[in-house]
Image: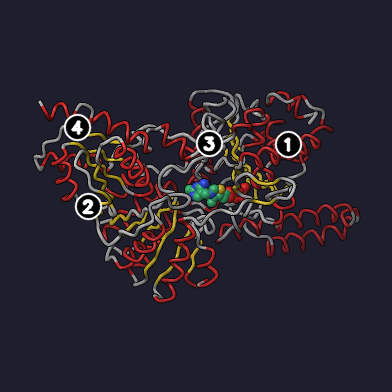
Amino acid sequence: LEILNKIKSSEDVKQLPKKELEPLCAELREEIIQRVSKSGGHLASNLGAVELSVALHRVYDTQRDRLVFDVGHQCYAHKMLTGRREDFSRLRMLGGISGFPKPAEAADDACISGHASTSISNALGMARARTLKGEDYSVVVLIGDGAMTGGLAFEGISDCGQSGESIVVVLNDNNMSIGSNVGGIARLISNLRVRASYMAFKRVYRRTIGKITKVYNVLHTIKEWVKDLFLPDNMFEDMGFYYLGPLDGHDVNHLETAIGYAKSLGIPVLLHVVTAKGRGYAPAETSPGKYHGVGSFDAALGAQAKEAECFSQVFGQTLTALAKENPSIAAITAAMEAGVGLENFAKAYPERFFDVGIAEGHAVSLAAGMAKQGLRPVFAVYSSFLQRAYDMLIHDVALSNLPVVLAVDRAGIVGSDGETHNGVFDIAFLRSVPSMKIFAPSNHAELRSMLSLALAHDGPSAVRYARGSEGAFVEDTSKQETAKLCDGADITIVSYGILINEALAAAEELRHSGINAAVFKLNTLDKPQTGKIIKSAAESGRIIIAEEACQSGCLGTKILSELVIAGAEIKAAKLINLGNGIIVHGEVRELWQKYEIDSAAICRAAREMTEGADEKNQN
Ligand SMILES: Cc1ncc(C[n+]2csc(CCOP(=O)(O)OP(=O)(O)O)c2C)c(N)n1
């Protein structure tokens, strides 16, 4: 990789002779495929944005100028061009570089991103700060057509268009979200592509007919009329943007010229660029959805490992089966059909399946409307993406006590996607939603049962489950709100969800060293029945509450306050949770260890709490 080896910074990209740009793109592609095949990560989106990344670095100085990525999953070429190529050996690993933009890694990353549709707002904020402070730098956004389906993007467009700020929004249109892009915005963007053929026609027309003045004049009038009749309205122009495009997003030289021109205009410009997701790697080009996010894979064959049955699949199968019996069940996803396991449901009941685009807030309000009129909507959503629908949960769902079911996937630490994707806040925010029932299945059988319980619940409910598969504990205890899994007089351990496996492993380990722990599992988290727990803790005098959640709003503080209110005599108590800091990326198990919520940490805490207990008892 001769040319890529020379690139250590954005500046080096600018120094390259034009003829080396295409070969540089080919090398970047090769490097991305090789690196991602080893570490896993986002593949197809990065392959599609190679020429765009190079062209942006030809025009902008990312140390000074602000390049804002939407979602940020397409930033690999940018990272490789800004001195982080070697760091890809530890991409998304604990202590290694993030798969998303991260200013702490390099000044070239303007801001953290990971969630869709925030880029234009963020960038406009930066542009306004520049103007108010009288500073001189450029602001540019790279946003996909999928991210444009999020309403937030349009709040940004609306404000930005009328701001007069010098800002370039590059719309990377590959006609794909993770899967096919959906909805009116997708149609609108694809309509704009009609212009590509129109522009090509116009060039030929100028070259030929344009030479004969008389004929030209007549035809020109007809042409303008035809254009008005058939070319779609350009919403971006209507909202105050200068629209350029659509452009071939894999012609690096043309891109450089167009981006340079857009920048020189000094007003809000929308540059529409057409790319192919997965470009240059046949398996990803053929199935871009499958290669959106991948684990490690065989680069030569494109073969990805088959994953074990996971919670998402169990959810999808169960809901599809329940929908057969209950025609009022409808399933909603916000652009995550495959991720949340709804592919089979969509095939079986296409009329009851709704992919709303990247629009979680809309999905919740939509579910509210459906529930109000007698349907049983189930919105399957990753925990971290549900965060942006908090108001709709309260305003549209809870105030009317509507039977909307949230299937909260990826609850807890998600691993290599890291800080933007960890589902560590849902307990805190869902517990604060009035009358929200929260189920916490620990295994596949419980997910099946609890989904049925949620659907039978007369009011809002959430079923939250982890990324990946169940652990050793596979018993279905869903009939009890709080289940006692083992007896023990020395200490009481409480946990729920997938972390129950750590609590049980700890209890087993402790038993070998003569410490007997009672283990309780919470199956509902809104108003857990803690009577048995309080009694057990009052008897042993020691309690540990272990959770894979942030500390604010956790169950531990609730149970401790109940112990105090009950006047229980507690000698020692320990809350094991994720605290209130930011949870980084890495393997889930490594992170459980790092943040001290695994079985070893539970054992350590129990030992400290019981140390010398026998002697004290004898005294
Ligand atoms: C709020 C939110 N919801 C869902 C996602 C999951 N997600 C990541 S990328 C993506 C598709 C983005 O499509 P697009 O912007 O067109 O980029 P492409 O991958 O096609 O390059 C989705 C739905 C997210 N990151 N943020």
Marks 4/2: CA–CA distance: 24 Å
Question: Secondary structure under badge 1?
Answer: helix
Q: Residue at x 48, y 50 (%)?
A: 468
Classify residue 87 by image quadrant: top right
Mark with earlier residue (4, 2): 2
Whole-percent x, y for residue 226 in the image: 73, 64
Q: Residue at x 72, y 63 (%)?
A: 225
Whole-percent x, y for residue 609 in the image: 23, 30
Classify residue 230 by image quadrant: bottom right
Three-letter code, disc 2: Lys
Mark with earlier residue (1, 2): 1
Circle 2 residue: 527
Marks 1/2: CA–CA distance: 53 Å
Marks 3/4: CA–CA distance: 50 Å
Circle 1 residue: 28
CB atoms of marks 3 and 2 within 8 Å: no
Mark with earlier residue (3, 4): 3
- Local crowd at mark 3 within 10 Å, few (<14), some, or many (≥20)? many
Circle 4 residue: 572
Does residue 239 show up?
no
Circle 3 residue: 123
Q: Which of marks 1 and 2 is in front?
A: 2
Q: Nearer the viewer, mark 3 or mark 2?
A: 2
